[in-house]
Image: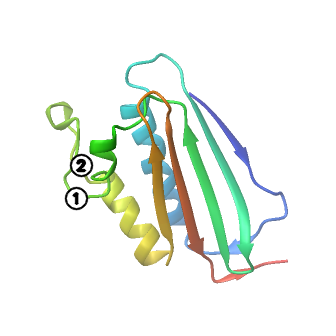
Amino acid sequence: VTVTSDCPDNMNVITNPGLSSQVLTNLIVNSVKHGFSEQDTGEISLSLRELTATSFELDYRDNGKGISKENLSKIFEPFFTTQRGSGGTGLGLNITYNIITNALKGSVVCESEPGQGVRFLIQFKVSDRIA
């Protein structure tokens, strides 16, 4: 898996790094376990941009197998998984959703079609931007 990032070098913010790390870890694990399960390689791209002095947008994409329309509406529900028999608990994206919407005071939208990868558009607030 190749990961690329597009983040301005001068972007410094005050936020919870542990929670931000958990969000990224959960998204990457999902890409590897689900999105790339039927392919030998994959690409993940991360792009961060400032919306206001205290809000940012993270654009997370992979080029995996994508998510069906039927499953897309369920991915943030607790215990929803397509890999129950393979050890999946269905909590990864539910935890991710709760971190983003509750702890980081943000929002998350997922866009996907089968064969077209996945895109998570995450907006979150920060305590302050350090110049």
Q: Position of residue 92 (x, y in %)?
A: 33, 52
Which of the marked residues, 2 or 1, is nearer the chain's N terminus?
A: 1
Q: Nearer the viewer, residue 20 or 44?
A: 44
Pick the quarter of the image with the N terminus.
top right
Task: Give the residue drawn at x 57%, y 42%.
Answer: 61
The C terminus - image quarter: bottom right
Most extreme residue toward the bottom, as rendered? Answer: 127
CA–CA distance in space, label 2 to label 1: 6 Å
Q: Position of residue 81 (x, y in %)?
A: 23, 43
> Which circle marks residue 78 in the picture?
1
Badge 1: residue crowd in 10 Å (few <14, some 14–19, many ≥20): some
Q: Quadrant of residue 94?
A: bottom left
| Amino acid identity at mark 2 | Gly
Q: Residue furthest top?
A: 40
- Element at label 1: loop
Q: Residue furthest left?
A: 85
Q: Is residue 106 left or right of residue 68?
A: right
Residue denoted by label 2: 90
- Sort mark 2 into few (<14), some (14-19) or many (20+) by Cα contacts within 10 Å: some
Residue type indicated by callout 1: Pro
At mark 2, the secondary structure is loop
Label of residue 122 in the image:
none
Residue at x 47%, y 48% (from the top left corner): 111
Q: Tell me: 107 left or right of 54.
A: left
Residue at image coords 54%, 26% = 42
The reply to whether callout 2 and callout 1 are in contact (CB within 8 Å) is yes
Residue at x 49%, y 69% (from the top left corner) = 107
Of residue 114 and residue 8, the one placed in the foreground of this image is 114
Q: Position of residue 106 (x, y in %)?
A: 51, 73
